[in-house]
Amino acid sequence: MIKHEKPILRNHTYTIDIVSLGHSGEGVGKYEGFTVFVPHGLPGETIEATITEVKKSYAKGKLKRIVKPAEARCQPKCPIYYQCGGCQLQHVAYDEQLILKRQTVVDAVTRIGKLNDVVIHPTIRASDSWYYRNKMQFPIGTVNGKVAVGCFAQGTHNIINTEHCFIQHEANNTVAQTVQKIITELGISTYDERTGEGVMRHVLGRVGTATNEVMVVLVTATHELPHQERIIAHLRQSVPNLVSVVQNINTDRTNVILGNRTKTLWGQNTITDKLGEFTFHISARSFFQVNTKQAEVLYNKAVEYAGLSGEETVIDAYCGTGTITLFLARQAKKVYGIEIVEPAIRDARHNAQINQISNVEFIVGDAVNVMPQMFKQGIHPQTIVVDPPRAGCEKQVLETFAAMQPERIVYVSCNPSSLARDLAVLEEYGYKTIEIQPVDMFSHTYHVECVALIESRKA
């Protein structure tokens, strides 16, 4: 058998035509038919790239020079954009970002899902594509002898000191700058993940965009926080609208950010924010969409697709802290929220209570086990809403949905690839995907949120 040589070699530079965008926002190019992934390359461009890695069927390269730029290429707003891994699309004009994100959905649905008759709408743009993140999670370390607080460089655990992030809420930037100053002035050690030594691991900032309330969470590798009172005093003096200072303890040698133990050092246990007409209390570990304005757009679209008249029974699988559940409850007769994480269900019940929503019921458990029991008890939902993790739904969950025979399924997804795979499975079970609405929740990154309307062929 003749062994075919790959047309490219590591550390060599080649001229490559970029033909599409990859699932992580990188340019996908071809050199003599061989696929090459190049971060910061754009469809329609001709570039020079130096090859950094060669695999059996593809290679990775680093952009060296743009031979022919795309019309959509622009100057990034952030001065550390090309070093930092927090954003991937700042070099793309915003209108083109929306087009590319829709195309990502189209490619996934047609190539992975093998579905060619689904209406995929233009991506809904953000009213403001900057300073939208209400939650910050920055690692803390020491770089060249100085305290660094910021994002990891793409594909590494090298911290890029980030004095001003253009997609973080301004209050979170103040938090990051203040914490860096405190650690430096007080001489507190930073965590070294190679040795497991040091104190300060991460800083989290949470902002209520409707209330301006700010929470600071300090993640430590130790049970005690050195200079605790001085840290609290400094934060209270430097961070406007601060209402909560929390310590999270993570002593494990792990990449997971938060540990299991959290204690409030000063102020409230939660901050408050609003989504639409609803008020939510958000704790250090609560899930809450990071773009509050676009989350409201997303949830309203999910309610629209649910097509409720006020007489329906609805199941909200993977309900988390009950945000979508409450939106659905305005228009449904009864909504059941199912979530395997018990603290999230506690938050969900509390959120229903403070918003005086009585036609919801929250159940702790795995949807695969809970839903068949509900069906046996005579609960037959007309609509199922699902918002799973990035990995999507297990096939058994989709089988359970189909067995309950809802007229409609509304699928909220943050990953077009797993969404497309699951839509194909639902097709096998007698459901047809009618339309998909992409929503730009994470401007200047490759991420795209979607809402899919799926209907029973029987109905």
Image (spheres, helix red, strand yellow):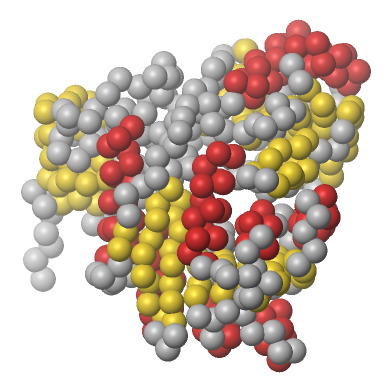
| Relative depth, front residue between 1 and 382 | 382
What residue sits 22% from the left and 47% below the top? 20
What residue sits 8% from the left and 48% below the top? 32
The answer to which image quadrant residue 119 occupies is: bottom left
Q: Would you say 65 lies left or right of 454 here?
A: left
Q: What percent of the width, then of the height, locates residue 141?
A: 64, 24
**Above-or-below relation of 191 to 367:** above
In which quadrant will I find the C terminus? bottom left
The answer to which image quadrant residue 73 occupies is: top left
What residue sits 72% from the left and 30% below the top? 211
In which quadrant will I find the N terminus? bottom left
| Relative depth, front residue between 143 and 305 | 305
Q: Would you say 342 lies left or right of 295 here?
A: right
**Above-or-below relation of 108 to 13:** below
Q: What percent of the width, then of the height, locates residue 71?
A: 17, 29
Q: What percent of the width, then of the height, locates residue 42?
A: 23, 37
Asked if residue 308 shows in the view, the reply is: yes
Q: What percent of the width, then of the height, locates residue 205?
A: 69, 30
The answer to which image quadrant residue 202 occupies is: top right
